[in-house]
Image (cartoon, grey):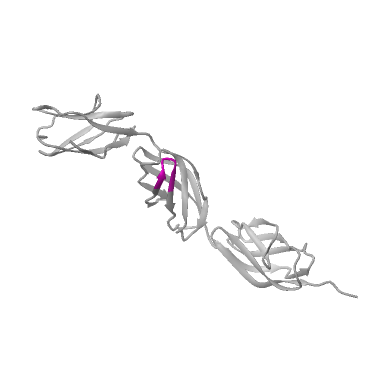
């Protein structure tokens, strides 16, 4: 007498299909010592029942006017616990693969990013791999994981737009570096790197449209200024010019 699924939430509420013979006139379905919360006699070979709350492994039995069946095991599964996301932000377009770490993830069937559901790959009971779907708008969304034991919320993923640089001022400074520069543009609040001619520069985020940076030393001549965030990078070509000191 197979049952499907053979596992469900400790809180109950799992719809289980029981297949067998001589099931007409079913009067009761029990999960261990507890009766199912709802029983439907679909046909002489099939009965559906909704599991009550429980823990551990219990035997499922069906009672008809002819007697009670032998028990078939049903496994109660606790709700998943998520501890962290391997990556907490990414491009608005999605498509990147991240890991979800936690406990009780082996029966995961879906992961939701702000209401958009995708199917994960189960790596182990403590880790999932999932491809992030496209987001509706830049900003944080809640991440939930659904398993046979239920749904767990509590983590956040941030969708990020690719930065765009519209201005660099001042546009020149000495080759020794040390020039304070204001970079303007859009989607700059998630910047994780600024470089001048390929050399990483110290910077701070002022707001979504402004960065403050200090030029590193560089060779005389124009260089590209590149701003990078988790979604990508934007290059302001020849936006800053290093000026050599006078020679006497």
For this orientation, the residue located farthest to the top is 33
Image quadrant holding the C terminus, namely bottom right
Q: Position of residue 121 (x, y in %)?
A: 39, 49
Magenta stretch: residue 124 in it? Answer: yes
Query: Looking at the picture, does residue 215 appear above or below residue 120?
Result: below
Residue 236 visible in image: yes
Please state which of residues 177 and 143 is positioned toward the viewer in this rendering.
Answer: 177
Q: Residue at x 60, y 61 (%)?
A: 228
Image quadrant holding the N terminus, namely top left
Horizontal side of residue 28 vs 56, given as left or right: left
> Quarter of the image holding residue 12?
top left
> Quarter of the image holding residue 202?
bottom right
Query: Looking at the picture, does residue 185 appear above or below residue 158?
Result: below
Q: Position of residue 23 (x, y in %)?
A: 11, 35
Magenta stretch: residue 243 in it? Answer: no
Please state which of residues 186 and 177 is positioned toward the viewer in this rendering.
Answer: 177
Q: Residue at x 55, y 57 (%)?
A: 230
Please state which of residues 214 and 221 is positioned toward the viewer in this rendering.
Answer: 221
Query: Looking at the picture, does residue 57 appear above or below residue 88?
Result: above
Query: Looking at the picture, does residue 97 appear above or below residue 102?
Result: below
Residue 159 visible in image: no
Q: Position of residue 59 (x, y in %)?
A: 24, 29
Q: Residue at x 40, y 49 (%)?
A: 112
Tell me where the magenta segment starts and ends, as one range: 122-128
For this orientation, the residue located farthest to the right is 248
Horizontal side of residue 21 vs 55, given as left or right: left
Q: Main secondary structure of the magenta part?
A: strand
> Quarter of the image holding residue 195?
bottom right
Q: Residue at x 81, y 72 (%)?
A: 244
């Amino acid at each position: 007498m197979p049952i499907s699924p053979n596992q469900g939430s400790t809180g109950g509420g799992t719809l289980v299909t029981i297949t067998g013979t001589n099931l007409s006139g079913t009067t009761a379905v029990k999960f261990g010592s507890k009766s199912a919360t709802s029983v439907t006699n679909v046909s002489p070979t099939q009965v559906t029942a909704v599991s009550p709350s429980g823990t551990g492994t219990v035997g499922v039995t069906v009672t008809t006017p002819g007697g009670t069946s032998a028990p078939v095991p049903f496994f109660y599964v606790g709700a998943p616990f998520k501890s962290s996301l391997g990556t907490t932000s990414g491009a608005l377009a999605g498509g990147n693969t991240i890991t979800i770490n936690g406990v009780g993830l082996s029966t995961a069937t879906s992961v939701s990013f702000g209401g958009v559901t995708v199917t994960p790959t189960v790596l182990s009971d403590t880790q999932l791999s999932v491809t992030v779907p496209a987001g509706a708008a830049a900003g944080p969304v809640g991440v939930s994981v659904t398993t046979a034991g239920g749904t767990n919320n509590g983590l956040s993923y941030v969708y990020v737009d690719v930065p765009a640089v519209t201005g660099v001022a001042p546009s020149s400074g000495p080759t020794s570096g040390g020039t304070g520069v204001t970079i303007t543009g859009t989607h700059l609040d998630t910047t994780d790197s600024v470089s001048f001619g390929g050399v990483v520069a110290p910077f701070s985020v002022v707001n979504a449209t402004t960065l403050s940076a200090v030029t590193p030393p560089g060779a005389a001549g124009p260089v590209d200024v590149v701003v990078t965030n988790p979604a990508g990078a934007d290059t302001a070509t020849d936006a800053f010019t290093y000026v050599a000191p006078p020679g006497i």
